């Protein structure tokens, strides 16, 4: 399974050399086997990519993220076809049962709220606040009709950043860090969805007409708490430095518990998406990431 996340800054050109990515800067060259690469994050707006390389990156289902001047992911490259049985899988996805969708979303929201309680316990937030989330956890309905997710999120974030905190406030540096980390995770999930032959625009709960990755917006929910935990425990300075952005990208190599084992986030995404396909095909249980144990990646 591919695992490398390549971060690109200050290079002249990236091209294909046999079955490897060749990165060139001046007279220096670096080659990385394509089979090892999970994703490439490009933060250099002057970097040139050859068309031949782009085609091979697509064939290997390698996620390519291109960042804007603000260093935030701006666009991504995904293959048109990502799985040998794509047509059959997409056809089945369009027929997914609504009742099962409702139960799946209940499971996703429940795991998200549970994971939030674990992060609050790590940060030693007072127990009454944690209990409020646990109460909401017991009240979730299919499709979360009473919006327990939003109620839990307000208690959760206010516990760390104060009662006046708003996720939409762009002046708060922690929000920029969270958005950067979430973008990386969201793109990695979209890549896995396409690789498994699913339609990324057809979500379980999210149905945004302008969101081509509604399904990724569903699946990311119980993974967000890994980014939250890192930003809370190691808050950024006044702006997102290159090293801090690298740390956020490397959260894909963090380990989280899923199906009784600690797995990297990349592997956990694969297991979670695979279990969703089996859930709709056979009724098997859904395997969700559990923040009971989180281990950050250390270089």
Image (cartoon, rainbow, N blue to C red):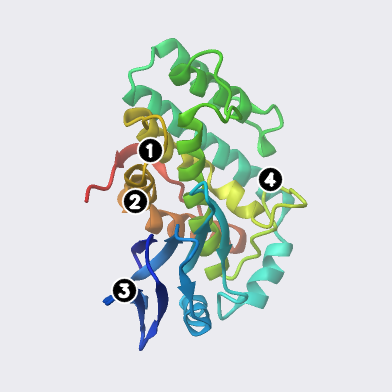
Question: Which residue is most to the bottom?
Answer: 18
Q: In terms of secondary structure, where does tag 2 sit?
A: helix
Label whose residue precedes the other's in the sequence (3 or 4): 3
- For the residues carrying marks 3 and 2, which lies nearer the camera in this image? 3
- The answer to whether residue 1 is seen in the rendering is no
- For the residues carrying marks 3 and 4, which lies nearer the camera in this image? 3
Label whose residue precedes the other's in the sequence (1 or 2): 2
Q: In terms of secondary structure, where does tag 3 sit?
A: loop
- The answer to whether residue 75 is left or right of residue 144 is left
Label whose residue precedes the other's in the sequence (1 or 3): 3
Residue beneath label 1, please?
291
- The answer to whether residue 293 is seen in the rendering is yes
How far apart are labels 3 and 4 at the CA level?
Answer: 49 Å
Label whose residue precedes the other's in the sequence (3 or 2): 3
Question: Where is 258 relative to 141, above or below?
Answer: below
User: Could you tell me residue 190's position as x and y percent?
Assistant: 55, 59
- Mark 1 crowd level (few <14, some 14–19, many ≥20, 10 Å Cα): many
- Identified at 46% across, 51% down, the residue is 287
Residue beneath label 2, please?
250
- The answer to whether residue 255 is left or right of residue 224 is left
Contact (Cβ within 8 Å) of mark 1 with mark 4: no
Question: Where is 268 relative to 173, above or below?
Answer: below
- Identified at 63% across, 54% down, the residue is 215
- For the residues carrying marks 2 and 4, which lies nearer the camera in this image? 2
Residue beneath label 3, please?
26
Residue beneath label 4, please?
205
């Amino acid at each position: 399974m591919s695992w490398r996340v390549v971060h690109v800054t200050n290079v002249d050109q990236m091209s294909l050399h046999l079955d490897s990515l060749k990165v060139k800067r001046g007279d220096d060259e670096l080659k990385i086997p394509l089979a090892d690469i999970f994703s490439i994050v490009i933060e250099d707006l002057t970097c040139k990519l050859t068309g031949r390389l782009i085609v091979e990156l697509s064939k290997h289902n390698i996620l390519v993220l291109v960042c804007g001047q603000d260093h935030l992911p701006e666009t991504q490259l995904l293959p048109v076809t990502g799985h040998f049985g794509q047509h059959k899988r997409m056809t089945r996805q369009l027929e997914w049962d609504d009742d099962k969708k409702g139960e799946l979303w209940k499971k996703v929201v429940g795991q998200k709220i549970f994971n939030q309680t674990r992060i609050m316990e790590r940060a030693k937030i007072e127990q009454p606040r944690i209990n409020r989330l646990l109460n909401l956890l017991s009240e979730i309905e299919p499709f979360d009709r009473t919006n327990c997710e939003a109620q839990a999120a307000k208690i959760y974030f206010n516990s760390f950043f104060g009662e006046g905190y708003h996720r939409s406030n762009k002046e708060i540096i922690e929000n920029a860090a969270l958005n950067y980390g979430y973008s990386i995770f969201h793109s990695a999930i979209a890549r896995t969805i396409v690789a498994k032959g699913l339609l990324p625009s057809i979500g379980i709960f999210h149905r945004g007409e302008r969101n081509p990755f509604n399904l990724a917006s569903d699946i990311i929910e119980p993974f967000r708490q890994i980014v939250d935990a890192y930003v809370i425990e190691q808050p950024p300075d006044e702006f997102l430095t290159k090293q801090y952005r690298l740390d956020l990208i490397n959260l894909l190599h963090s380990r989280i518990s899923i199906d009784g084992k600690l797995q990297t986030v990349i592997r956990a995404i694969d297991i979670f998406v695979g279990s969703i396909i089996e859930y709709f095909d056979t009724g098997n249980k859904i395997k969700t990431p559990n923040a009971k144990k989180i281990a950050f990646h250390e270089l």
